[in-house]
Image: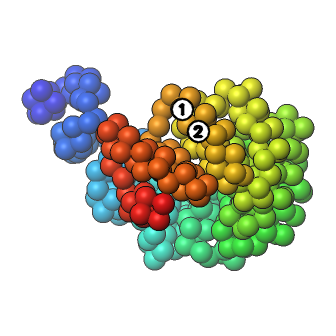
């Protein structure tokens, strides 16, 4: 249908049919997108950006790069911050440092270097590549920064173990959001600063910010490593109050915390009440039994896990053997 309407020159109807193609059929979706694009008599920046992002998100990364290069050659006047943001995210996800540097040069050439919308994915790309000083240099030169850029800078610093620099940046922010707090808490956890994780979580609550599954996951892991059962129970109560108790990620973290704090029965209760479970949930309970000397229960839950359709991974199998 799309092909027929396109060949007849009726792109409006072709678009309507195209929009109803299920994206699960990616081959059809991408091929029809290409066909519509090829037959368009006029292509603006939005058309090019849709084609590039379509390939980047659903098709082939190399085809997305090919479209970008074609746009540079035939339609450079249509390049905008959406184009560059899409390409930077693609380079970041694919770890394409050389292409990322080329796009950085093109961003400067076309005058988009000071755009905040471009700055965040640019910083994220260099941070993932471990080029933290490039990130910092870019951040320092930006005339305008938003909270997204600041959060990206904190993430990059934490990845590189620059904890004090992250703290300094965080405490100097004029604007913070929940992601700023969670980024700091997760970063501190990654760098083995469990007590500071718990303290910052308390500060976050007092400041009135909303926690998510990642916030709870980090602080519960910290409590488990600190064997801080009392604080872990308080955070469990916070998870219940904020409707996170049924989140599979939070539930697994609670089971892990109780197991490490030698309160295996509490962990067992959390596990049994979980409305959703995944391989991590089952493995966490199994490991908890093994760590607390409940070998029979560990073997039993291993078979229950399989009976519920979950295939154990190597870590699960190793935990059963060690039990």
Q: Where residue 74 is drawn, which disc sits there? A: none
Secondary structure of the residue carrying tag 2 is helix
Residue 26: % across, % down: 24, 42
Which residue is labeled 1 in the image? 272
Q: Nearer the viewer, residue 233 or 39?
A: 233
- Relative horizontal placement of residue 58, taking residue 143 as reference (left or right): left
The residue at 12%/26% (across/down) is 1
- Relative horizontal placement of residue 204, taking residue 248 as reference (left or right): right
Secondary structure of the residue carrying tag 1 is helix
The colour scheme used to paint the residues is rainbow
The residue at 26%/30% (across/down) is 22
- Relative horizontal placement of residue 200, taking residue 289 as reference (left or right): right
Which residue is labeled 2 in the image? 268
The residue at 22%/24% (across/down) is 17
- Relative horizontal placement of residue 300, taking residue 285 as reference (left or right): left
Q: Dot 1, crowdedness within 10 Å: few (<14), some or many (≥20)?
A: few
């Amino acid at each position: 249908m799309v092909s027929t309407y396109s060949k007849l020159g009726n792109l409006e109807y072709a678009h309507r049919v195209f929009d109803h193609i299920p994206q699960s059929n990616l081959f059809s979706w991408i091929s029809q997108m290409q066909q519509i694009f090829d037959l368009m008599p006029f292509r603006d920046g939005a058309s090019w950006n849709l084609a590039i992002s379509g390939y980047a998100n659903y098709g082939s990364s190399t085809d997305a790069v090919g479209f970008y290069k074609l746009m540079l050659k035939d339609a450079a006047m249509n390049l905008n911050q959406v184009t560059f943001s899409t390409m930077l995210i693609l380079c970041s996800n694919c770890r394409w440092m050389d292409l990322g540097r080329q796009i950085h040069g093109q961003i400067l050439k076309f005058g988009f270097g000071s755009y905040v919308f471009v700055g965040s994915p640019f910083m994220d790309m260099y941070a993932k590549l471990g080029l933290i000083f490039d990130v910092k240099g870019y951040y320092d030169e930006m005339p305008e920064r938003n909270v997204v850029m600041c959060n990206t800078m904190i993430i990059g610093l934490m990845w590189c173990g620059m904890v004090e620099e992250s703290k300094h940046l965080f405490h100097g922010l004029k604007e913070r959001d929940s992601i700023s707090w969670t980024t700091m808490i997760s970063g501190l956890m990654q760098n083995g600063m469990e007590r500071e994780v718990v303290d910052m979580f308390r500060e976050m609550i007092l400041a009135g910010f909303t926690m998510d599954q990642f916030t709870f996951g980090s602080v519960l892991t910290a409590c488990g490593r600190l064997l801080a059962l009392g604080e872990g129970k308080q955070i469990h109560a916070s998870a219940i109050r904020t409707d996170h108790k049924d989140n599979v990620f939070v539930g697994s973290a609670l089971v892990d915390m109780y197991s490490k704090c030698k309160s295996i029965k509490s962990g067992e209760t959390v596990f049994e009440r979980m409305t959703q479970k995944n391989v991590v949930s089952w493995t966490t309970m199994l490991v908890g039994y093994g760590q607390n000397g409940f070998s029979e229960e560990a073997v039993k839950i291993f078979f229950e896990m399989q009976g519920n359709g979950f295939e154990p991974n190597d870590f699960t199998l190793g935990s059963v053997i060690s039990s």
